[in-house]
Image: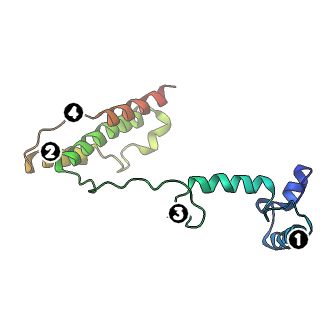
Amino acid sequence: LNLATKSDFCKHSALCMSAAEANVAESAAIADKDTDTNATSEFPPILQELREVAMRLHTREQAPREGKAEEPQKPAEPYVPTQADYLQFLVDSYVVYVALEEIVNEVDALAPFRNSGLERTQALETDIAYMCERFDLQRPDAGKAGSMYAAQLKNMIKS
């Protein structure tokens, strides 16, 4: 297929066609392929090039016939979170929800969300206290991820 203009591309592109038009175009491409010795694909050149690049990003598991990317190494043992990991998650979540509730209480446009039942800090505080008592854990400081996300939320409101 020789496509001289963008409108020609759209006429032959599966992205711009209905199913019926695509079938007609596919038949025409096959007919052109039989008559044109330079045609190596039923797709327009740009689509063929994009397809080749996409296949290089797929693994054999994802695209058994054409995948070229290496399979990612799977860990020998799956990660199993501990009670301390879960407690850290709760503390990070608490910091984020405190920031969200402060924002809702300070910004008048968010007034409909005040006292709406979406508040989570009380429940998180209860869960954190339970985890510390039940599993004899010390309450950790907020982690980097939780603190950074809470700070980002506050900065978004300031700007």
- Spatial CA distance of label 4 from label 3 is 41 Å
Q: Pointer 4: what residue?
A: 141
Residue 126 showing in the rendered view: no
Residue 129 image label: 2
Q: How crowded is mark 3: few (under 14 residues within 10 Å), some or many (20 or more)?
A: some
- Residue at left 73%, top 52%? 49
Q: Is mark 4 on a helix, strand or loop?
A: loop
The quadrant in which residue 63 appears is bottom right
Q: Pointer 3: what residue?
A: 62
Q: Which of disc 3 and disc 4 is earlier in sequence?
A: 3
Q: Residues within 10 Å of mark 2 (few under 14, many from 20)?
A: some
Q: Pointer 1: what residue?
A: 34
Q: Where is residue 157 in the image (x, y as percent from the top left)?
A: 48, 30
Q: Identity of the amino acid at label 3? A: Gln
Q: Which of disc 1 and disc 3 is earlier in sequence?
A: 1
Residue 110 image label: none
